[in-house]
Amino acid sequence: MVIGGTDTAITSAPFMAQLWYYDDKGTTDTSDDVSFFCGGTVVSPTKILTASHCVKGFNWHAYGAVITGTDQLPTTNSDGSTDLHGGTVSGVWRQWNHPSYTTTTHGAPDNDIAVLTLPNAVKATPVRMTTSNDTASYAGGTVATLYGWGRTSSTSNDISQTLQSAQLTIHADSTCTTAYGSDYVTGHMVCAGTQSGSDTGTKASCNGDSGGPLIVNNRIVGVVSWGVDNCVAKGDYSVFTKVRSYVGAAYPRIDDTNLSGDSKADLFLRNSSTKTGYELDSKGTSLASRVSWGSFSGYNVILQTDLNRDGYQDFVLRSSSTGAVYWEHYVPASSSWTKTQIFSNWSTRTRIVAPGDVTGDYKPDLLSVDSGGTLWIYPGKGDGTFGTPVSVGTGWNQYNALLGHGDFNGDGKADLIARQKSTGYIYLYRGTGTAGSGAFSSRVQVRTWSTTTYNTLDAVGDVTGDGKADLLARTPGGTLYLYPGTGQASSGIFATRISLGTGFQQYDILG
């Protein structure tokens, strides 16, 4: 756990998670059992940020459990039952570790970041990852807070029963490189803490803290990754994964809700004659057979989103007759869908977009363009309601398509794609993670596609499952193409198109 720390109540760190793994390998022989403990951080109601070395090679769905909402480790009561001390235990639905996770020459983990997806939302209050452009948090001398249940002493292998925290000073890369040489990968790692040679005077992470957070200004800037044996060697430091370098890879895994629940964004469309809605699940570079959702008559906008971040994909629907906008979402407790009106009359809104989190608070927002061409951000509150709308600016009716769902350029911020009516130019508007006129950077032209090339464009998120937002484009003849995102913010934004089939002219709404 944290060496040099103090007892800390869960109210001070409600985002803390305990990760328990046990696999007896199905044998009576205990020598082949695999059992370990890691820390983690709740970064959305169904997502736990942790370290790759806690995840890769292990089957968390079958053998893992996550406990949130308590500062105590579980104990066994006299009757043999388990006392969670007010905590909640969850299984694990899916796991992801950084695809470039590896070890250095001497075994130190690199690209050491992972995400566990829970099957249901937890009540624990999430903490946000820092942003990709955050440099201040990593400046030498910055004070950060480490949390964990790991070892509290270099002379005992026992982890702490109670959550601990300690204030650690972040060091410059040059200091870390001097200590660790090539094992310390500048840009991927940050080191912090003080190690005196003994427990006294040391403030460091230790065994059992792996995967837990390093916090600056209420954002997670580091994930406990590695250090030296027994954690107190003088002149060495605790090493953390540098979160700002991995937001682009991790955030799409945090905001990856989709209809089928497999981390690949799916297509929803409506037949123009029957008004039947269909789900077409992504298979990566192709689509599965369509599944009927019944009638979606009476709507002229259908968008996929997850306004309450419960892990279930929702719909935003606009009534053709009244212009009222509805949020239709799944209620796990009753295994039913409910529809709630969220706006009364948006019939004159020329565009409605559900791009995800635009303002940088991890809560999905809605955007709309009014009849005068002003683009508005409606900041989501994470429960299907919205704060006061904020104007981004005017002139947005020059576009005959405005769409987005996720991060196109790999910086962990939601972006927009727009098509200009007069020229067919396709522009990328990169999100900045803020509201108001500065919500998007200056546009970058990435393609030229007139309506005779593609009469419909659609963005539903990461269709291929590689962590990058993709684009769908339909020809007037009905061929649907997938343009896989590359993460670039230039003309190279999309890889070579892939045909998803023909006959898509039968659908009047793709969302």
Image: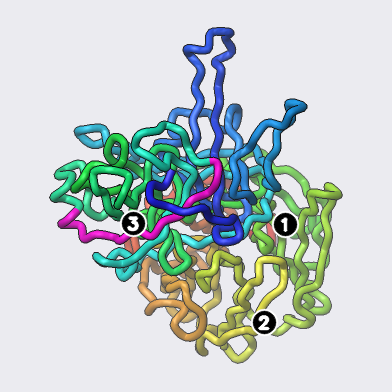
The quarter in which the C terminus is drawn is bottom right
Near mark 2 (Cα within 10 A), the count class, few <14, some 14-19 or many ≥20, is some
What secondary structure is marked by label 3?
helix
Question: Residue at point 37% right, 67% down?
Answer: 446
Question: Residue at point 17% right, 55% down?
Answer: 175
The residue that label 2 is drawn on is 349
Q: Is residue 460 above or below residue 357?
A: above
Near mark 1 (Cα within 10 A), the count class, few <14, some 14-19 or many ≥20, is many
- Residue 234 seen in the current view: yes
Q: Amino acid at mark 3?
A: Ser
Near mark 3 (Cα within 10 A), the count class, few <14, some 14-19 or many ≥20, is many
Q: Nearer the viewer, mark 3 or mark 2?
A: 3
* Residue 133 percent coordinates (x, y): 34, 68
Label for residue 245? 3
Range of the magenta residues? 161-175
The residue that label 1 is drawn on is 270
Q: Give the left or right position of residue 292, taking residue 375 as reference.
A: right
* Residue 502 percent coordinates (x, y): 59, 47
Q: Give the left or right position of residue 485, taking residue 194 as reference.
A: right
Question: Residue at point 40% right, 45% down?
Answer: 113
Q: Amino acid at mark 1?
A: Arg
